Image (spheres, rainbow, N blue to C red):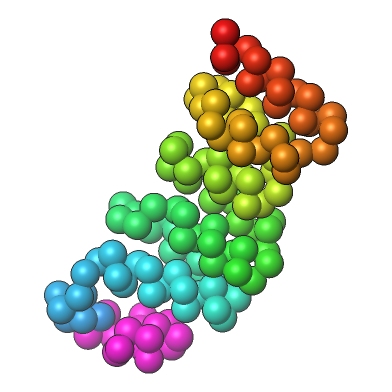
Amino acid sequence: STYTHLLPCHHYLRLCVPHLQLLLLNSSLFRYWWLRIQVLGEQEEFVELEKFSKQKKNPIGFEPFVDVCLKKEKKIEAKKYLPKVRDELKVQYYTKLGMLEEAAQIAYDRRDLEALKILTPLCDPVLKEKVNLYIRTLAK
């Protein structure tokens, strides 16, 4: 699509805002955000990606930001977006980043017994005991 040809040239796009607005009229804002995130991630433009994440109202959520960072194995970059991930997906995304203790705490705070059971086999023995305690507490 035209987006994927123009988006890598973000310097050109800054000069060509009216053309970009025309493109947006012919496509959804959601698709634009998704493509922009993908292109910035592919080019490893993480400073630009962070700037983009702070623009206006985000129609797509912050999960794609985390995903694109993880795709490039940039966990530190991905962690920047974790607090903004939708609550119902936080356990999943903290787990993707290997932050199992935080994922377990979030699951416990949300009283999500299923998530705790899924986390259990992924944990080291010390954390597994803590997760089992959470499960026993919630099961009462």
Q: Quadrant of the C terminus?
A: top right
Q: In percent of the image, x 54 and y 73: which residue is there?
A: 41
The image position of residue 76, as x and y in percent, is: 69, 56
Whether residue 3 sits left or right of residue 109 in the image: it is left
- Callout count: 0
Give the residue displayed 61% in from the left and 31% down from the top: 116
Residue 125 falls left or right of residue 106: right
Q: Residue 126: which quarter of the image? A: top right
Can residue 63 be seen at all in this image of the molecule?
yes
Give the left or right position of residue 26, taking residue 132 as reference. Answer: left
Residue 46, magenta (yes or no): no
Residue placed most toward the observer, 125 or 42 = 125
Give x and y (percent) for residue 70.
Answer: 62, 63
Q: Which residues are magenta?
A: 1-19
For residue 8, side relative to residue 117 (left or right): left
Q: Is residue 15 visible?
A: no
Q: Residue furthest top?
A: 140
In which quadrant is the N terminus drawn?
bottom left
Instruction: Check the image and report above or below for 70 versus 136.
Output: below
Write down the quadrant of residue 6 in the picture. Answer: bottom left
Placement of 47 over or under 122, stated as above or below? below
Which residue is farthest right?
125
User: Is residue 3 inside the magenta stretch?
Assistant: yes
- Per the picture, the main secondary structure of the magenta-coloured stretch is helix
| Res 25 quadrant in image | bottom left
